[in-house]
Amino acid sequence: MQATSAFLFPLFTAILSGSLLLYLMRNDLVSLGIVSLFLLGAITLVSSIINGAMLLSLNANPVVDTTITTSQWLKFAASLIALIGSIAGILYLLRLPRTSPFVNLFALTLFGLLMIQTARTSFRANYIFYDDATEYLVYAHGATGVKEVMAQVEEISERTSGGLNAIVAYDASAPDTGVSWPFVWYLRDFTALRSFDQPTRSLRDAVAVIVDQKNFDKIEAALGDGFYRFDYIRMWWPNQDYFNLDRTRVLNAITNPQIREGIFDIWFDRDYTTYAQATGSTSMTLTTWQPADQMRLYIRKDVAAQIWNYGVGPSEAPVAADPYEAGTIMLAADPILGAELYPPLGLNAPRAIATGLNDDLYVADSRNHRILHIASDGSLLHEWGTFADQATGDAPIGTFNEPWGVAVGPDGSVYVSDTWNHRVQKFSEDGEPIKIWGQYGQPLPEVPESKSSFWGPRGIAVDSQGRVFVADTGNKRIVVFDSEGNYITEFGTAGLDPGQFDEPVGVAVANDGTVIVTDTWNQRIQAFMPSEDGMLYLPSAQWDVNAWFGQSLENKPFIAVNADKHVFITDPEGYRVIEFTENGEFVRTWGDFGVGPSEIGLAAGIAVDLSGFIWVTDAGNNRILRYTLP
């Protein structure tokens, strides 16, 4: 009954209105005919375009039923004939005399409505949507997040320093100068303003830090746990779905009624809801808008507590101090083996480093896709390896795709984790190929050969019995092989419980057989003791690490153990080395960002030689550093 009423009432209203209009225009049916044919022509024009687009779409699909195509042809032909007839009728009626200004009034009304819509659009563009990316009038422009960040930073500074004297840092990193636009101007009156290119721990002095999106992965490691984080859009562009239009997209926009409705809503009301639903987009709200540049505001927790505006909440929230700060020492590297020692390629993101049996070293020169064998004075003894990608072609033994791990066995054999070829390779001490095993994939219980499937293996270590331990990073496990690549056992699954991993990277074996692993994204170190038969490795200790905050592709820590079972780890994007006892007690740390002898660009691999020297690969500055512990 309700549906019938919904149909009959508009129909009755239309008939009554039409009859009344016909009665009133009985003395000038010519004018009434012109207006009626104009409206009919507009309707049939739209119908012709839609039906024509539908016909083109059907013709592009060879499997469509011919009866559907024939039906569509009839619809298109009918609408086109009606359109042509309307135009012919209007041209004919325009030659006949008219006795009223009805046509002129209709045209004036039509243009008046367009004028009102133009004025409405102009007002909304200038006074309502002027700051939003939903408005097409402005191209790239600052988002409202800029104003919100400035309001907060100014309030924080006023309330903590009595003026614009608080330390505020902003990201000016290359190549696009970070958030310098527009903050270098808006922050011009701050007396303690700092800019930075690379996030470092020195930013912890700032009450507020504004960070560009390209440094999101690095900033967490630099700031630690002492800041609150707030996400904003810095700059955005209007919707760019009109980019890369092709025939298919145009026809789909015309024939899809939901997209047509969405386009009308955008034009009339700047409402993207229907269009987003029709296109399956989740980035057309003001909080998720794309294309856009993101930024973050970090506010120090103790400062946030000082300016708390409400009657509940923390009265005091001291900065979460770096527990290693008191044990930080200044330690200069000597010697420093620079990239110039290894022409013509130099060094390119060196990762793991391992000590040999004869006062020598092996370095995984990852992005040069090779292994360097060097003496302790830096002179080159051997090198081997070229690039090959197993996924796209032949990759024989001796070729690499970013080798990250290298280790030396008790007989001098060299083992390499060929990371993005997802395999392990074995060589003699001078680089002669011996063995290769592994392939890309995940281990499946029902497929025995998949036990040696890897997903981006990183760290690798060899114990005194020649067993090879591979950190199968992507598969969240440590896999144990014999010296010939035969599978022995494995331990670890994905998770947070003892014995589980989330991004295991570095692996080392102590003299007593304890296996120690950097459980990176769980931010802890785990130690495992083998059973008597070496088939089980049970968790024996674990301790948290106040490092490894970011999850970037570069933030992959390695680990080494000395004769006293002291554990040394790298904090890649913390630009430092941290030392612990075998029980996880902090001993000391050294390093900060920079290029000097006591600074590190990106702390990567680490090893302890027979003399007790600590060797670190600096993947950011492409050099190898040796430290003498005090």
Image: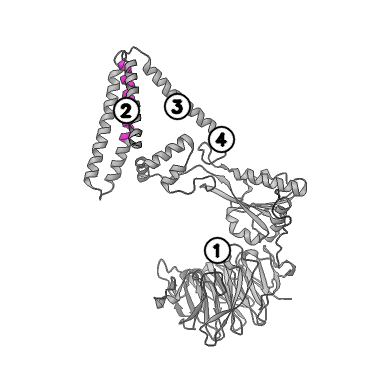
Q: Which residue is the site of mark 4?
A: 128
**Label 1: how many residues lie within 10 Å, few (<14), some (14-19) or many (20+)?**
few
For label 3, the SS is helix
**Label 3: how many residues lie within 10 Å, few (<14), some (14-19) or many (20+)?**
few
First in sequence: mark 1 vs mark 2: 2
Residue drawn at (39%, 76%), measured in percent from left and top?
Answer: 447
Q: Is residue 40 magenta?
A: yes
Is label 1 in contact with label 2 (beta carbons under 8 Å)?
no
Q: Which residue is the site of mark 1?
A: 553
First in sequence: mark 4 vs mark 3: 3
**Label 2: how many residues lie within 10 Å, few (<14), some (14-19) or many (20+)?**
many
Q: In the rendering, which numbered label is found on residue 41?
A: 2
Relative height, residue 361 to residue 113 (above, below): below
For label 1, the SS is loop
Q: Which residues are magenta?
A: 27-48
First in sequence: mark 1 vs mark 3: 3
Q: Residue 409: horizontal and vertical position, in percent?
A: 55, 83
Task: From the image, state whether disc 1 or disc 3 is nearer to you.
Answer: 3
For label 2, the SS is helix
Q: Which residue is the site of mark 3?
A: 114
Picture quarter containing residue 340?
bottom right
Query: Closer to the camera, 50 or 179?
Result: 50
